[in-house]
Image: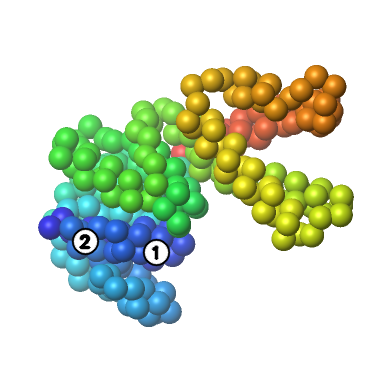
Amino acid sequence: MKKVCIVGGGAMGGAIARRLASTREDLSVTVCETSAAVRESLCLVKGLAVTESLVDVGGCDVLIAAVKPPTVRRVLEQAASLSIGTVVSVAAGIPLRLVEAWSGKASARVMPNTPSLIGEGMSVVSFGGMVSEDQRSVVLSIFEAMGQVLELPESSFDAATALSGAGPAYVYLLIEALVDAGCAQGLTRLDARQLVTTTFTGAAAMVQQSTEHTAVLRDMVTSPGGVTIEAVGVLEKLGLRGILWEAVEKAADKSSQMAQ
């Protein structure tokens, strides 16, 4: 049985811990958390071991550093003296070269997103040169419990962070705006929310299952002289495409600045 230690039981660390405890009986999962209140909450989760200090764990096959970026170095330097197989950082902006230098271990960098909380996440993974094939497989299987996993070179991390890491915020904003627009047309908020969210999930599923370009799928909805083309015309005139392009560009630039 592989032993996984998660340092940090906050939003992301806690989500990973809970998900692994509920779906992976083949793993032994321990969470290290300094907050007594968070430890008390995690103690209620079946299958989780909870401790205050990483030293108490002794060693593990995989250590996941799910702490804020300013705390990562301290955690990894502490891990350097322990018996740990692979170190995984989920902290934004911390490059693999630093994860490896601080820990001295085989290392991976992962960027999950918040839908991982419900097992519908997208995790981007990059591995350092010291990682073996077995270690790679174990790390990938851990994050597959959170949703889908895409392995990319670290050079693509800024772009991926701007798309999938920050992406849920873009989607939430679009949903919020469309729900409000529906309410302005006389729908109840509950009905508008159902119409919008189901449309988003259905459209996304069609894109995933189709080999057609999204422009072809959009054309299927956009009849000449019809309702949809009237709305699409407004979106194009107001520059929605350009706004999204610039938003992703700014997010990628910020991710790059954080890494430096």
Does 91 appear above or below 152? Answer: below
Does 82 appear above or below 34? Answer: above
Where residue 252 appears, x then y in whole percent?
55, 34
Q: Is residue 239 visible?
A: no
Where residue 58 appears, x then y in whole percent?
15, 65
Where residue 69 appears, x then y in whole percent?
44, 52
Task: For the residues labelled 1 and 2, say whether their Cβ atoms are less than 8 Å apart.
Answer: no
Tell me which corner region of the image, top left, top right, bottom left or bottom right, holds residue 248.
Answer: top right
In what element is the residue under mark 2? loop
Tell me which corner region of the image, top left, top right, bottom left or bottom right, holds residue 56.
Answer: bottom left
Q: Residue at x 26, y 46 (%)?
A: 141
Q: How many angstroms separate mark 1 from mark 2 (CA)?
A: 17 Å
Does 129 appear above or below 198? Answer: above
Disc 2 crowd rating (10 Å Cα; few below 14, some 14-19, many 20+) is few
Q: Is residue 76 left or right of residue 3?
A: right
Q: Nearer the viewer, residue 35 or 194?
A: 194
In what element is the residue under mark 1? helix
Which mark is first along the chain, 2 or 1? 1
**Mark identifier at residue 25:** 2
Q: Residue at x 23, y 32 (%)?
A: 129
Coloring scheme used: rainbow
Name the amino acid type tagged 1. Gly
Quadrant containing the N terminus in the rendered view = bottom left
Name the amino acid type tagged 2. Glu
Tell me which corner region of the image, top left, top right, bottom left or bottom right, holds residue 223.
Answer: top right
Q: How many marks?
A: 2
Q: Residue at x 64, y 49 (%)?
A: 197
Does 211 appear above or below 2? Answer: above
Residue identifier under label 1:
14
Q: Is residue 82 left or right of residue 87?
A: left
Q: Residue at x 80, y 50 (%)?
A: 182
Disc 1 crowd rating (10 Å Cα; few below 14, some 14-19, many 20+) is many
